[in-house]
Image (cartoon, helix red, strand yellow):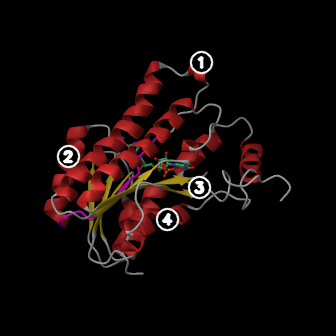
C-alpha cells in the first residue's frame, strides 16, 4: 500500500474518470499528487479523494495541447511539491465520426489533445527527470491502439501514435534511468464513456453489445485501470519499460462468443 510513499506524482486529466481514479490510488499509495486538468474543470471530487491521505495535493489548470502551459505547470509543481518522480500522461478526448465526415477541425483537435498533448507532457517529464536520472511515465493509450473501430479513425491514430512514442521514448531514456510505458484500457465507466453512450441511438443495446464483446462480461471501473497505472509507476515495475499493459477485460485477447 505504500508503493509511492514520499514520491511526487503528476496526473493529467485528473479531474475525472481514469485520471481521477489514478490520482486517488497514487495518494492512497503515499504519493503527493499534482492534479492537472483543463481550466473550468471541477476538481472537487479529485481533491476530496486525495485529501484523505497523507501526501500533499496540488491543483494545476493547464491545457496539455499548449506546450508553454505544460512547461509552466511542471515548473510550478516542482516548486510547490518537489522533484517529480512519476507522471500519468492521461488527458485525452474522443470524437466519434465516420471517416468521410471527419472534418479537418475534428482531426486536428483530436491530434492536438491526445497526441501533441501527450508529447508535450512526456517531453517535459523527461526534461525534469533526466536531471535526476530517475522517474517513470505511463501514457494512456487505449485498446483502440491495438484494433480498429468504425467511427474512430482520428482517435485510433492518436492512440497508435502514443504507443509508438512510448517505445521510442523508453529506448532513449533507459540509459538515463527513466522508464516509459503505456496502458491500453478497454471501455471504462467514465464521463467520456457516458457522453458517447448517451449519444447512441439505442444506449441500452449499445451497452449490451459492448459488454458482450468483453471476455469478463462487463466494462471496467476506473479504479481497475488505476491499479495498472500505479503498478507501472512504482518500483515493482523496475524491469518494465517500452511496453504496454492491456487492461481490457480480455476484449482484444479472447474470442468472447461462446463463453
Ligand atoms: P474523461 O473525459 O472522464 O476525463 C478526461 C479528463 O481530461 C477530463 O477531466 C478533461 O477535462 C481532461 N482533459 C481533456 N482535454 C484536456 C486537455 N487538453 N488538457 C488537460 N486536460 C484535459 O475521460 P476518461 O475516460 O477518464 O479518459 C482518460 C483517458 O483514457 C483518455 O486519454 C482516453 O482516451 C483514455 N481511454 C478511455 C477509455 C474509456 O472507455 N473511458 C478507454 C480507453 C482509453
Whether the magenta-drawn stretch holds residue 235 is answered as no
> Counting residues from the N terminus, which is met first, the one under dot 4 or under dot 3?
3
Badge 2 is on which residue? 71
Marks 1 and 2, how far apart at CA = 36 Å
Marks 3 and 2, how far apart at CA = 31 Å
Badge 1 is on which residue? 100
Q: Mark 4 and 2 residues: CB-CB less than 8 Å, in contact?
A: no
- From the image, state whether disc 1 or disc 4 is nearer to you: 4
Residue at coordinates 17% horizontally, 66% vertically from top-left?
82
Q: Residue furthest right?
A: 258
Q: Quadrant of residue 202?
A: top right
Picture layout, residue 119 above or below residue 7: above
Question: Helix, strand, or loop for circle 1?
Answer: helix
What percent of the width, then of the height, locates residue 5? 31, 78
Badge 3 is on which residue? 189
Q: Is residue 175 left or right of residue 247?
A: left
Q: Mark 1 and 2 residues: CB-CB less than 8 Å, in contact?
A: no
Q: Is residue 241 left or right of residue 254?
A: left
Magenta region's main secondary structure? loop
Badge 4 is on which residue? 228
Residue situated in front as seen by the camera: 16 or 166: 166
> Counting residues from the N terminus, which is met first, the one under dot 1 or under dot 3?
1
> Counting residues from the N terminus, which is met first, the one under dot 4 or under dot 2?
2
What percent of the width, then of the height, locates residue 252? 66, 50
> Counting residues from the N terminus, which is met first, the one under dot 3 or under dot 2?
2
The residue at label 3 has a CB less than 8 Å from ligand 1: yes
Res. 242 in view: yes
Amino acid at each position: 500500500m505504500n508503493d509511492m510513499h514520499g514520491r511526487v506524482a503528476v496526473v493529467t486529466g485528473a479531474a475525472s474518470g481514469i485520471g481521477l481514479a489514478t490520482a486517488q490510488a497514487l495518494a492512497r499509495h503515499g504519493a503527493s499528487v499534482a492534479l492537472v486538468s483543463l481550466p473550468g474543470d471541477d476538481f472537487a471530487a479529485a481533491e476530496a479523494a486525495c485529501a484523505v491521505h497523507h501526501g500533499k495535493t496540488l491543483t494545476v489548470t493547464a491545457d496539455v495541447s499548449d506546450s508553454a502551459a505544460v512547461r509552466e505547470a511542471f515548473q510550478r509543481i516542482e516548486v510547490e511539491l518537489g522533484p517529480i518522480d512519476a507522471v500519468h500522461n492521461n488527458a485525452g478526448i474522443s470524437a466519434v465520426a465516420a471517416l468521410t465526415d471527419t472534418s479537418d477541425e475534428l482531426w486536428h483537435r483530436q491530434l492536438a489533445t491526445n497526441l501533441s498533448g501527450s508529447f508535450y507532457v512526456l517531453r517535459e517529464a523527461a526534461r525534469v527527470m533526466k536531471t535526476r536520472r530517475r522517474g517513470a511515465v505511463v501514457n494512456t493509450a487505449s485498446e483502440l491502439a491495438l484494433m480498429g473501430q468504425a467511427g474512430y479513425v482520428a482517435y485510433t491514430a492518436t492512440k497508435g501514435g502514443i504507443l509508438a512514442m512510448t517505445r521510442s521514448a523508453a529506448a532513449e531514456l533507459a540509459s538515463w534511468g527513466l522508464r516509459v510505458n503505456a496502458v491500453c484500457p478497454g471501455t471504462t465507466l467514465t464521463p467520456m464513456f457516458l457522453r458517447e453512450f448517451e449519444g447512441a441511438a439505442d444506449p441500452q443495446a449499445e451497452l449490451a453489445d459492448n459488454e458482450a464483446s468483453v471476455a469478463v462480461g462487463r466494462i471496467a471501473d476506473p479504479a481497475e485501470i488505476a491499479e495498472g497505472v500505479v503498478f507501472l509507476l512504482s518500483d515493482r515495475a523496475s524491469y518494465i519499460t517500452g511496453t504496454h499493459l492491456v487492461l481490457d477485460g480480455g476484449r482484444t485477447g479472447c474470442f468472447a462468443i461462446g463463453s
